[in-house]
Amino acid sequence: MHQAKRAVGILGGTFDPIHFGHLRLALELYQAFDLEHIRLIPCFQPVHRKLPIASPEERLAMTKRAVATETAFKIDECEIKRKGPSYTIDTLLELRKKAPQAPFCILIGIDAFLGFTSWHRWQEILENAHLIVAHRPNYHLPQTGIVAKLIRDRLVEEATLIHQKTQGCIFLHPITSLEISATDIRKQIAMGKNARYLLPDNVYEYIKKRGTYSVSTL
Ligand code: ATP
């Protein structure tokens, strides 16, 4: 990463569990923007939602299984090692220290982007990284308000600029719409239904073996 000339993609998430929605988002944006690699960063403690059901170690183990054979993806354990609330800005500043000149881009689903301005120190995030917003047809961008202004001010059409600047641009890119959510997978498993084909087989096997989501705590 120290020498990275092409932008490094960062996909943070709870990954409780990781599923094909996350993996397609990462792979499609990796290819579309010719990224150096994607860093998948399971959080320790999410700050905008309920606590996860699976432990950080289990979520990390599932994430490792999911991408074991994909060389474009690297797992970054920094948030799990850091413990405490997982703020994206802290993670970015850690990465920035290691690679002061590298272009970074945060990959974010449009659902999460709509709440981006409530993220801790969000302005500083844009001082340290670009955002690539993965667009899905069922979601609409606002026409007014702070997110709309952010898009007006920072939206860039030319994808190659992601490698030339180190931070501050917003890119919008459509991805295959897979209406899969970890919440739904957890629910299905807790109800005794078969969740196969929503997530990688080796992740599903891991979940079944450990009984991770078998008892409904939703
Ligand atoms: P949960 O249902 O538990 O809230 P989730 O499935 O939404 O979880 P997260 O780990 O919270 O997954 O999401 C991490 C990132 O992946 C976010 O940026 C989110 O927008 C994106 N994402 C989640 N599901 C999808 C999907 N089906 N397609 C594209 N992006 C997704």
Image (cartoon, rainbow, N blue to C red):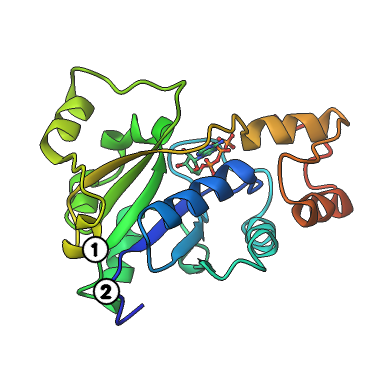
Q: Is residue 17 above or below residue 174?
A: below
Q: Residue at x 84, y 27 (%)?
A: 191
* Cβ atoms under marks 2 and 1 closer than 8 Å: yes
Q: Quadrant of residue 179?
A: top right
Quarter of the image for the N terminus: give it: bottom left
- Is residue 122 left or right of 179 when viewed as pictured? left
Name the mark on residue 173: none
SS at badge 1: helix
Q: Quadrant of residue 38?
A: bottom left
Query: Is there any visible trace of residue 45 in the rendered image?
Result: no
Residue placed under numbered mark 2 in the picture: 5
Percent from the top left, x then y, of residue 9?
Answer: 38, 59
The amino acid on which the numbered mark 2 sits, given as a three-letter code, is Lys
**Residues at marks 2 and 1, CA–CA distance in whole angstroms:** 7 Å
Q: Which residue is mark 1?
A: 163
Task: Choose between 130 and 82: the one closer to the eye.
Answer: 130
Front-most of residues 36 and 57: 36
- Dot 2 or dot 1, earlier in sequence: 2
Q: Position of residue 104 (x, y in %)?
A: 29, 62
Residue drawn at (63%, 59%) of the image: 63
Q: Position of residue 60 (x, y in %)?
A: 63, 61
